[in-house]
Image (cartoon, grey):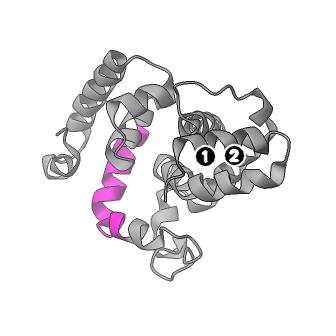
Amino acid sequence: MQLPFENEKEIIEKAKSDPEIFGKLFEKYYDQIYRFILHRTANVAAAEELTSNTFFKALNNLWNFKWSEVPFSAWLYRIATNEANIYFRKNKRIDLKDFSEDAGFENGSLASYDEHKILEAELSEKRIFLNLQKAIETLKPKYQEVIVLKYFEEKSIKEISEILNKSEGTIKSLIHRAVNMLKEKIDPSLYDEYKNE
């Protein structure tokens, strides 16, 4: 359940002087940050590591966080996006074998995550996901980010704008270009699953 806006602000301020309170923020946002990074990397082990890195950096830099109109979640997504981009600079290609049966989606190795059933449902059409993931991988990071946030995370244009610190017009343009690039790379029947509403 979402924490009320005022309570979250209070928790963040208290967590600046008491790191144990940061655990409430960790519990609230862990699953969505993990899912976002998993969709970016298509690698379970990398998603676990990068999610841990995201929260570690968030905790260490919490003193530097300034409360504003941009939600705390957007700040976390920015850190996660940066972590994913660093990962891609070091690892040029996504290893799609990570989404094979050995990756654990079929034998339950992700059972400890609250959103395991949601992830299973999202990945049940593995062929669609893997083909789409291959196509997304060929895009520049700025296009990967907006596609994952819009179609996998189901973020609004406003939310994506806040997360990536770009204008809403720029986000719409990036999504439009990214979708057009994906149309050329994937089977039209796959595109129908993720076309713009």
Kindly tell me whether residue 92 is visible in this rendering.
no
Highlighted magenta segment, given as a residue range: 121-139
User: Is residue 132 covered in magenta?
Assistant: yes
Q: Is residue 100 above or below residue 61?
A: below
Residue 110 position, x and y percent, is 55, 73
Q: Which residue is mark 1?
A: 7
Mark 2 crowdedness (10 Å alpha carbons): few <14, some 14-19, many ≥20:
some
Q: Is residue 1 above or below residue 139?
A: below
- Lateral position of residue 79 relative to residue 162, left or right: right
Q: Quadrant of the C terminus?
A: top left
Residue 120 position, x and y percent, is 40, 71
Amino acid beneath label 1:
Asn
User: Which residue is depicted at the point 33% across and 30% down?
Assistant: 157
Most common SS among magenta residues: helix
Do tag 2 and tag 1 residues touch (Cβ < 8 Å)?
A: yes
Amino acid beneath label 2:
Ile
Q: Is residue 119 above or below residue 5?
A: below
Q: Which residue is mark 2?
A: 11
User: Is residue 38 covered in magenta?
Assistant: no
User: Which residue is depicted at the point 20% across and 37% down?
Assistant: 183
Kindly tell me whether residue 5 is visible in this rendering.
yes
* Separation (CA) of disc 2 from disc 1: 6 Å
The total number of labels drawn is 2
Nearest to the observer: residue 102 or residue 66? 66
User: Which residue is depicted at the point 15% across and 48% down?
Assistant: 192
Mark 1 crowdedness (10 Å alpha carbons): few <14, some 14-19, many ≥20:
few
Numbered disc 1: secondary structure: helix
Q: Quadrant of residue 24?
A: bottom right
Give the label on residue 122, or none.
none
Nearest to the observer: residue 185 or residue 172? 172
Residue 69 position, x and y percent, is 52, 25
Numbered disc 2: secondary structure: helix
